[in-house]
Amino acid sequence: VGLTVVAFGTSAPEVAVSVGAALKGQADLAVGNVVGSNIFNVLFILGLSALITPLMVDRQLIRQEVPVMIGVSVLLLVLALDARIGLFDAALLLVLQVAYTVFLVRQSRAQTASAAAQGGDDLPSLDATAWDAKLPAQIALIVGGLVLLVGGSQALLTAAVTIARSLGISDLVIGLT
């Protein structure tokens, strides 16, 4: 569950940029951002990490996560064959994301219950007296993070479009379609 929260958090900038691009009618930028960031994260970040130190991979990752990632990538390709990601496509992908997240949470709870039944509770305890353990501080951090995320995504989107236009990329793409 912790890794799922981290995954959502690290994907939040891509979501903000893609939604901003879609709302501005720049669908190519939205799709390119999602696909490009996934390629970069999987190949570059994973490869760079493995260069620094060998990565130990749990068998569950190979058996469960990799096939799901490949399957969703193929599904996206199939959905994009008509040169658009429509409302049905988006709804399907969103439902699959929610269903997979629910599946992961249930799987994690079952594993935690199993580990607790066997007497192995190696989860760190949280310090309830820390300033960020209080609900108002957590809400302020979330709101502040969201404000910065939206502002940063807007700046990134504006800069990406400006750079593409200055290089003549957007005109070339528009001329090809």
Image: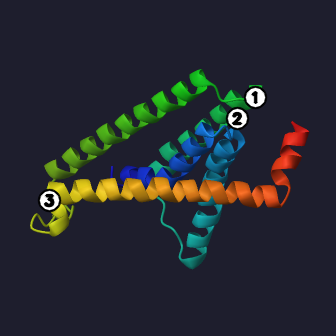
Q: Secondary structure at mark 2?
A: helix
Identify residue type, mark 3: Lys
Read off the residue under disc 1: 81
Closer to the chain start, of discs 3 and 1, is 1
Q: How is the image coloured?
A: rainbow
Q: Residue 61 at x, y = what percent?
A: 48, 51
Task: Tell whether 12 sits left or right of 160.
Answer: left
Q: Residue 131 at x, y = what percent?
A: 16, 68
Residue under the image location 57 percent in, 59 percent down: 155
Q: Confirm or deny contact between disc 2 and disc 1 (CB under 8 A).
A: yes
| CA neighbours of label 1 inside 10 A, class few (<14), some (14 to 19), many (20+) | few
Q: Residue 107 at x, y = what percent?
A: 32, 40
Q: Secondary structure at mark 3?
A: loop
- Can residue 10 be seen here? The reply is no
Q: CA distance from mark 2 to mark 1?
A: 6 Å
| CA neighbours of label 3 inside 10 A, class few (<14), some (14 to 19), many (20+) | few
Read off the residue under disc 2: 77
Q: Confirm or deny contact between disc 3 and disc 1 (CB under 8 A).
A: no
Q: Residue 75 at x, y = what percent?
A: 64, 32
Q: CA distance from mark 2 to mark 3?
A: 44 Å
Q: Which mark is residue 134?
A: 3
Task: Tell whether 108 sits left or right of 152.
Answer: left
| CA neighbours of label 2 inside 10 A, class few (<14), some (14 to 19), many (20+) | few
